[in-house]
C-alpha cells in the first residue's frame, strides 16, 4: 500500500492571502517615483560636474582669435584640421568606404613603385601564376646559390690574367 504523509496542511487548494490591487498599484507608483528621483539626482550631478569643469577650464591663449569659443566643442568643418587618426563619426559608412577601397586595391592592377618597376596584380591572377609556375624552391644540397658575392668572385677568377700558379677553384653553374 501507498502511505500518504501529511505535512500539516489541513486542506488542499490555493493560498487565500493574495496581494490586493491597491498594494500592486502602490508598488508601481513607488517604483516610478524612485526612477524619477534617481533620474533627477543623476541629471543634477552631471549639471554640477559640467559647471565645475567649465570654471576650471584653462584660459585660451591671447593669440587665439576666437576668445569666446568653447574649446570643448568642435565645428563640423574643423574636424579635417585634426591629424590622423581621427575619431569615427559614422562607423558604418567609414568602414564600408575603407573596405571598398581595400577590395579595389586587391582586385586591380596598379603601380606600387613606378621608378623601381614594382606593380600589384589582382589576387586571382597571382594565384593562377603561382599554380602555373610553382613556389620558389631552395637550391639542392651541395649547390652554391647564386649570390652577388659568388658571381663577383667567379667573374674575378675568369678575368684573372696574371698567370699565377695558383689552382683555380671550380665554378658552379
Image (cartoon, rainbow, N blue to C red):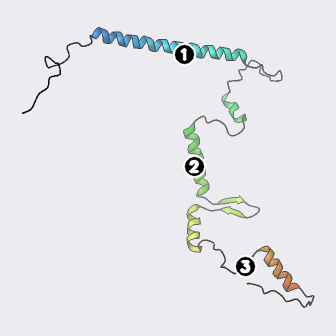
- Do labels 2 and 1 touch, CB within 8 Å? no
Q: Secondary structure at mark 3?
A: loop
The image shows residue 46 at horizontal and vertical percentages of 59, 17
Task: Identify the residue under disc 2.
Answer: 100
Q: What residue appears at the point 41 percent right and 13 percent down from the top-left corner? A: 32
Nearest-to-viewer mark from 3 and 2: 3
Crowd band around label 2 with a 10 angstrom C-alpha radius: few (<14), some (14–19), many (20+)? few
Q: Is residue 151 above or below residue 95?
A: below
Q: Which mark is residue 42?
A: 1
Task: Identify the residue under disc 3.
Answer: 144
Circle nearer the N terminus (3, 1): 1
Say which of 135 and 116 sits in front: 135
Crowd band around label 3 with a 10 angstrom C-alpha radius: few (<14), some (14–19), many (20+)? few
Query: In the displayed structure, does residue 77 sit left or right of residue 29?
Result: right
Q: What residue appears at the point 76 percent right and 74 percent down from the top-left corner? A: 147
Q: What residue appears at the point 74 percent right and 61 percent down from the top-left corner? A: 114
Quarter placement of the C terminus: bottom right
Amino acid at each position: 500500500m501507498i502511505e500518504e504523509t501529511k505535512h500539516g496542511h489541513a486542506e488542499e487548494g490555493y493560498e487565500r492571502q493574495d496581494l490586493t490591487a491597491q498594494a500592486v498599484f502602490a508598488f508601481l507608483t513607488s517604483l516610478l517615483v524612485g526612477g524619477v528621483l534617481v533620474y533627477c539626482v543623476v541629471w543634477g550631478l552631471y549639471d554640477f560636474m559640467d559647471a565645475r569643469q567649465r570654471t576650471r577650464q584653462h584660459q585660451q591663449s591671447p593669440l587665439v582669435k576666437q576668445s569666446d569659443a568653447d574649446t570643448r566643442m568642435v565645428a563640423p568643418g574643423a574636424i579635417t584640421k585634426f591629424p590622423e587618426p581621427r575619431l569615427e563619426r559614422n562607423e558604418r559608412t567609414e568602414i564600408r568606404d575603407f573596405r571598398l577601397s581595400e577590395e579595389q586595391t586587391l582586385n586591380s592592377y596598379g603601380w606600387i613603385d613606378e621608378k623601381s618597376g614594382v606593380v600589384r596584380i589582382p589576387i586571382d591572377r597571382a594565384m593562377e601564376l603561382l599554380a602555373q609556375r610553382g613556389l620558389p624552391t631552395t637550391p639542392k644540397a651541395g649547390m652554391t646559390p647564386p649570390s652577388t658575392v659568388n658571381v663577383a668572385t667567379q667573374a674575378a677568377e675568369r678575368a684573372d690574367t696574371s698567370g699565377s700558379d695558383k689552382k683555380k677553384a671550380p665554378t658552379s653553374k
